[in-house]
Image (cartoon, coloured by chain):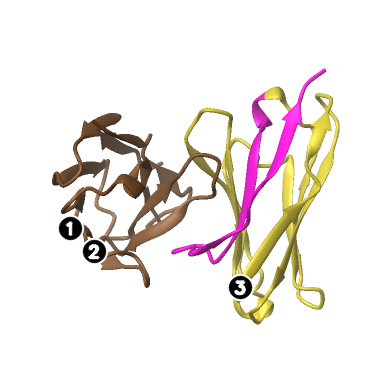
Chain colours: A yellow, B brown
Amino acid sequence: EVQLVESGGGLVQPGRSLRLSCTTSGFTFGDFAMSWFRQAPGKGLEWVTFIRRKAHGGATEYAASVKGRFTISRDDSKSIASLQMNGLKTEDTAMYYCTRGFETPRHWGQGTLVTVSS
Amino acid sequence: DIQMTQSPSSLSASVGDRVTITCQASQDINNYLNWYQQKTGKAPKLLIYHASILETGVPSRFSGSGSGTDFTLTISSLQPEDIATYYCQQYDNVPRTFGQGTKLEIK
C-alpha cells in the first residue's frame, strides 16, 4: 500500500525557517517525481513545487510565490522528500500536502499544518 | 500562467440529480486536466485525469468531458457521499494551476 506521511509543520515566526518531510512507503521512491501542494485555511488548492526523479535529472520547478525561498529535495535511499522553507511569510500559512508524481497525483499524504505568525 | 475558471463556485442539488461543473482554461491545455474531490478536513482525491479518464475505484456516476479549453465534470446521479468541494487543475504547463473550486451541497 502506498503511504505518504508529512511531518515538520508547526507555528513559526515570520522570517524564520521550517523543514517539512514526506516519508513514503509501499513503492519504489526513486521511480517517481514528488510534489508539494498547499491550502491556506478556507481557501483553494495551490501547487508549490515538484522534483523529478534522478533518471530525469532531478529537475525542480517552483511556484513564483515561493521561488528563491523554498527548496525541494529528495533522498532516494530513505524514500523521503523534503521541503526547506526559508524566509517564511504570513501568507505561507497553510496545510502542506506531499504527493507522488507531478502530473496525475493519485497518492496524497494527510498534510502537515504550517502557521506563520508572530 | 494558465488561468482556470471554474463554475459555479457553489451548488445545491438533490439526491439523484445530475450535476455539472465546468472549468475553462485560458489557453489550450491539450486535455491535461485533472478533477479532484476534497471532503472537509481531508486531502484531495483524484477523480479524473486527462480530462476524461476515470481513476481506478471512482464510481462510474462521475465522468469528465471536454477538450481544448472547456471541460466538464458530471455526476450522473448525486449521492449523499458526494458532498465535497471539487477542483479542476491543469498539468499542461508549469505552474500547475487550479480552478477556485465548487462547493457541492445537498438540498
Q: Is residue B75 above or below residue A67?
A: below
Secondary structure under tag 3 reads loop
Query: Taking B6 as reference, is A51 left or right?
Result: right
Q: Which chain carries label 2?
A: B
Q: Mark 1 points at which residue?
A: B65
- Residue A56, image x and y in percent? 60, 76
Q: Mark 1 lies on which chain?
A: B
Question: Residue B102, can we see it?
Answer: yes
Q: Name the residue under label 2.
A: B52
The 10 Å Cα crowd at callout 3, few under 14, some 14 to 19, many 20 or more, is few
Q: Is residue B65 above or below residue B7?
A: below
- Residue A60, image x and y in percent? 63, 59
Q: Is residue A33 above or below residue B103?
A: below
Asked if the stretch drawn in magenta spans residue A53, the answer is no
Which span is picked out in magenta? A91-118
The 10 Å Cα crowd at callout 2, few under 14, some 14 to 19, many 20 or more, is many
